[in-house]
Amino acid sequence: MDPSRAFVTSVKRLIVKVGTAVVTRGDGRLAVGRLGALCEQLKELSSHGYEIVLVTSGAVGLGRQGLRYRKLVNSSLADLQNAEFEVDGKACAAVGQSSLMALYDTLFSQLDVTSSQYLVTDGDFRTNSFRKQLSETVKSLLSLKVIPIFNENDAVSTRRAPYEDSSGIFWDNDSLAGLLALELKADLLIMLSDVEGLYSGPPSDPNSKLIHTYIKEKHQREVTFGDKSRLGRGGMTAKVNAAVCAAYAGIPVVITSGYATDNIIKVLQGKRVGTLFHRDAHLWTSVKQVDAREMAVAARECSRRLQAVDSEDRKRILLDIADALEANESLIKVENEADVAAAEDDGYEKSLISRLSLKPGKIAGLAKSIRILAGMEDPIGHVLKRTELADGLILEKTSCPLGVVLVVFESRPDALVQIASLAIRSGNGLLLKAGKEAKRSNAILHKVITSVIPRNIGEKLIGLITSREDIPDLLKLDDVIDLVIPRGSNKLVSQIKNSTKIPVLGHADGICHVYIDKSAKLDMAKQIVLDAKTDYPAACNAMETLLVHKDLSSNGSLDGLVEDLKRKGVALYGGPRASSLLNIPETRSFHYEYNSLACTIEIVDDVHAAIDHIHQHGSSHTDCIITENHEVAEIFLHGVDSAAAFHNASTRFCDGARFGLGAEVGISTSRIHARGPVGVEGLLTTRWILRGSGQVVNGDKGVVYSHKDLPL
């Protein structure tokens, strides 16, 4: 839950205001699908004990569409040849109101919900007796689980135009909703619009940013409103005016999109959707609004300053980070233990808790890996190729940072340290979003690391994102962020790939295979298989599927390995052949990552069948063959299309530190510039530097190209 939305846990009475643009389609017809989804949300909330009051617009727009059709049907040919005709707004309201309410009644009836109708005018609220009776009637209806539906009675309203009468009590359905929130003592007002919320400028402007929390003192000066609603009278200006009035009288307000099918429920779950209006927003110094673009731009500016300093200065930062981690180990331990205890209380799986825990010696190991990274050759500005294009014209291809990298990773605090150190070594700005389970660990690690970054570079080089709701905004910044690296579930990786134009590097699953060929030394095979499965079962490079040549299954050689796995506590599941032979449960899917002491076994005919199985069911992560036949080994190593292919070695070696990379930002199964464990080189790209002495192209008339490779 977003900290600024914590108040929703005490909400019971809720007013929902639906705008004309939500109720109707672009052609003026009813948006039946959207209204149906709205009614379903309200039904679900009512069943969970919420008291719901609905304020709806749309009668005028709906009536106008119907009366235009009726006038067209009843017009003569001569009438049709005249200029466009318009219909009276009050007549539209009278006609549209019955259709609108009939639809609400039908939709709610289908959901076994009873609704009631209130048509009110500005003048009604001028008498205290009306207000008292209104409150009593609504209270009675809500106690019976009835949903009251309010609408301004535009058909008989005597006000000529909204907001012209300064003595008015309300001026449209937006201000009516705000008034009702106060009259009925609501706990929250949600106003549904055709856009996600209040933006800093017109929503159609790509430079406009969604304002998650409205602060009157700030945004009243900065916000530029776009056009009014395409159908309704008020538009965003009316909504903001009503929201400010209600919020500063004590009723929180959220403006969000009514096009989404679950935004009301998301608001009540405390998710950061839409724009929140709250009278205490200006006091929330501890809950800073994250401006995605500002954070990314700041990281880029800091990265450019980092690139400009001397190589020894960048090295010094890493060494200072290593020292700071060791100096603050006890503080880090306290915060990490608090995260682990909370995860255990919440009933998280053992595999997640294992990844979350910074076990004894972990900080020392991280500090050691950072020092190793610092001692490596500076990767920035490394000349990869030097070419003489022509006499006195020298071209160099050099390594350079990508710019700004966004990493979304799972609940492994040690990953934050590794990623941050790699970003600094490679000269990149970094944005980090880690799992909420490691919130306290990540916060202290981020503080320790950024505290030693020199002021001339800036601590904003590494930004820590604390809310998942910020991710969609960041994924839109393809002009500022250069690479996204997701480390987590298949669902997370898929969502990110489908939500951004930014290049994505990473892996969704770690379904690693070990294939035991018929020529394998069985003692070696047992040692490798047990290590690959049991050394760290939660790791993405742990073995998940064991493939065995058919000859080993027929001569009894497999039995000893199966018993060893069982003694280690490994739960075994089989493919169709192995489950029958070994009398073990059949697996539901070969494409499954256990992340625990469990694995799948299957029998295959030969190395080619093993390769086919891996290609069909694997995840292109790490796959191993155990064999003494070097010809078969080469077939496997060159035939398996995985980021890492091993011969007679545990899959657990697929790791940045073990590969000598110092650390890793993740393991990539993508087929772009980096695969396997991604270290410093995976965070670099190239640029060209050309040095001349006054040469010009001039149609290539005066240039004699040599294109000669020069020594580095």
Image: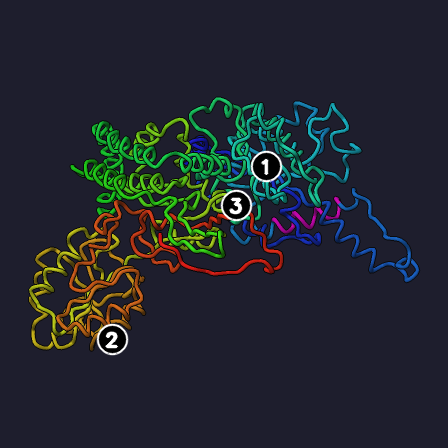
Q: Which residues are drawn in magenta?
A: 93-104
Task: Describe the element under mark 2 as helix, strand or loop.
Answer: helix
At label 1, which amino acid type do we have? Answer: Leu
Q: Is residue 217 above or below residue 33?
A: above
Query: Can residue 81 be seen here?
Result: yes
Magenta span includes 103: yes
Q: Which residue is most to the right?
A: 78
- Please say whether residue 194 is one of the residues in the magenta stretch: no
Relative side of 647 to 279, left or right: left
Indicate which disc residue 479 carries. 3
Q: Residue 675's spot in the image, x, y percent?
A: 33, 57
Q: Position of residue 146 (x, y in %)?
A: 54, 41
Q: Nearer the viewer, mark 1 or mark 3?
A: 3
Q: Residues within 10 Å of mark 3 (few under 14, many from 20)?
A: few
Residue 420 falls in image quadrant: top left
**Which of the two discs, 1 and 3, labels the residue nearer the N terminus?**
1
- Report helix, strand or loop for mark 1: loop
Disc 2 marks which amino acid? Ala
| Badge number at residue 198 | 1
Q: What residue is at 25 percent from the left and 76 percent from the top?
A: 608
Judged by depth in the image, the label closer to the viewer, 3 or 2, is: 3
Q: Earlier in the sequence, mark 3 or mark 2?
A: 3
How far apart are labels 3 and 2 at the CA level? 45 Å
Gap between marks 1 and 3, in whole Å? Answer: 23 Å
Q: Quadrant of residue 151?
A: top right
Q: Quadrant of the N terminus?
A: top left
- Name the foreground residue: 310 vs 280: 310
Looking at marks 2 and 1 on the same chain, the residue that comes earlier in the sequence is marked by 1
Residue on which the image places disc 2 = 609
Q: Is residue 108 above or below residue 155?
A: below
Secondary structure at badge 3 equals loop
